[in-house]
Image: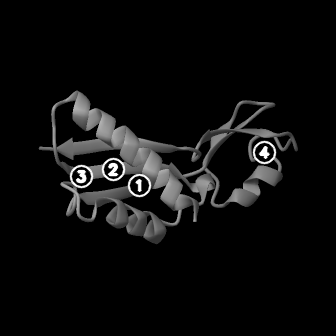
Amino acid sequence: MHELSLMASVMDIAQEELTRHGARRLTLLRIRHGVLDQVQPDAMRMAFEAMTAGTPHEGARLELVEEPLRLSCCMCGHQFSPENRNALYEPCPACGESVPFSVVGGEGIFLDHLEAE
């Protein structure tokens, strides 16, 4: 369950921000994650609840936003958002070349927004 370590890292960053701004209690945490990261939302929520239980952050809301996959053809530069990951192995829909694509969206985990008091 890599979600536990992911949430621990996000909570460390959130705590640094709270300290930096003189806040004591987290009320909302929004995380953006790419579809390629295969984050399990239920596992992330469970990790969040476990890490905030019994702390001043208990009861804070967690919002998870999944970013869709976006690819760019290395041959023609065409950018597109495919329906599924299999597009990584299919020809470019614009030029038809079977070349690698660059991932330009849908990868990575980011602390997007937090609210505190």
| Disc marking residue 21 | none
Residue 16: x percent and y percent?
32, 34
Report the residue at 63% width, 60% height from top.
Answer: 83
Describe residue 100's horizontal placement relative to residue 39 as left or right: right
Is tag 4's residue or tag 3's residue first in the polypeptide sequence?
3
- Disc 1 marks which amino acid? Val
Residue marked by disc 4: 92
Q: CA distance from mark 1 to mark 2?
A: 7 Å
Report the residue at 11% width, 44% height from top.
Answer: 117
| Disc marking residue 28 | 3
Of the residues tagged 2 and 4, which is closer to the observer?
A: 2
Is tag 3's residue or tag 1's residue first in the polypeptide sequence?
3
Q: Is 93 in front, or is 46?
A: 46
Residue 79: x percent and y percent?
64, 38
Is tag 2's residue or tag 4's residue first in the polypeptide sequence?
2
Q: CA distance from mark 4 to mark 3?
A: 40 Å
Q: Are marks 1 and 2 in contact (CB under 8 Å)?
A: yes
Q: Is 73 in front, or is 105?
A: 105
Residue 108: x percent and y percent?
56, 44
Residue 49 visible within the image: yes
Is tag 1's residue or tag 4's residue first in the polypeptide sequence?
1
Name the element at disc 1. strand
- Disc 2 marks which amino acid? Arg
Report the residue at 16% width, 38% height from top.
Answer: 23
